[in-house]
Image: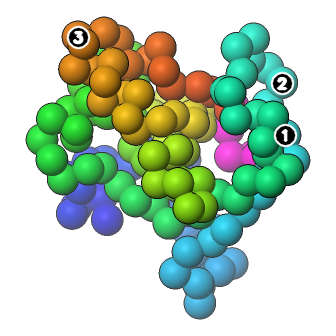
Amino acid sequence: MAQQQNIKLPEWFQLYRTTLAEAFNSETELLIQFDRFSTEFDVGTPSRFELSETWYELSFPGLPRKGLERQALLKGSPTLKIFPIGMKEGDPDLQLGINLSDSETTIYQFSLSSVFATFSAGEDTATVLFPVFTSPATC
């Protein structure tokens, strides 16, 4: 997947991905539900109030193929290069993603359309990326 996407996945993520693949090796997608997001963040994602009804599909959608949309995730912020790892079931606009930095293990939730609009306006896309977990271990 990393070669097809022309990226380097962080080592910590490769370890977790390998663990999930082993645990669910017969599944092409994994649906999960969270009982809460991390409480470490002052500003929470707007969808935190809907968690009891929300399922996330860990299907690793990867980066968009279109150049501008791909750039919005990889170059929309000087501090974040976002790689999508999942999406809300039935709503591919609401996604979960990781920063491609090896030093950061935060998992973010974001609306693709908001990221694209923010990038098109020339603004830092980090403003529409909501940290929801500090690491996969806190999921």
Gap between marks 3 and 2, in whole Å? 30 Å
Q: CB atoms at circles 1 and 2 under 8 Å apart? A: yes
Measuring from the top left, give residue 14's x and y in whole percent: 49, 57
Visible in this render: residue 128? yes
Residue found at x 44% / y 17%: 126
Is label 2 in a helix, a strand or a loop? Answer: loop
Label 1 and label 3: CA atoms lie apart by: 33 Å
In space, the residues marked 1 and 2 are separated at their CA atoms by 8 Å
Q: What kind of residue is marked 2?
A: Thr
- Going from N to C along the chain, the mark reached first, 1 or 3, is 1
- Quarter assignment of residue 16: bottom right
- Magenta segment boundaries in residue numbering: 133-139
* Image point (22%, 38%), residue name: 69
* Residue 31 colored in magenta in the image: no
Among numbered discs 3 and 2, the one appearing first in the sequence: 2
**Residue type for callout 1:** Arg
- Residue 44 at x, y percent in the picture: 72, 21
User: In the displayed structure, does residue 15 sit left or right of residue 51?
Assistant: left
* Dot label at residue 59: none
Q: Which mark is residue 122?
A: 3
Q: Residue at position x 22%, y 20% from top? A: 120
Q: Residue at x 40, y 38 (%)?
A: 112
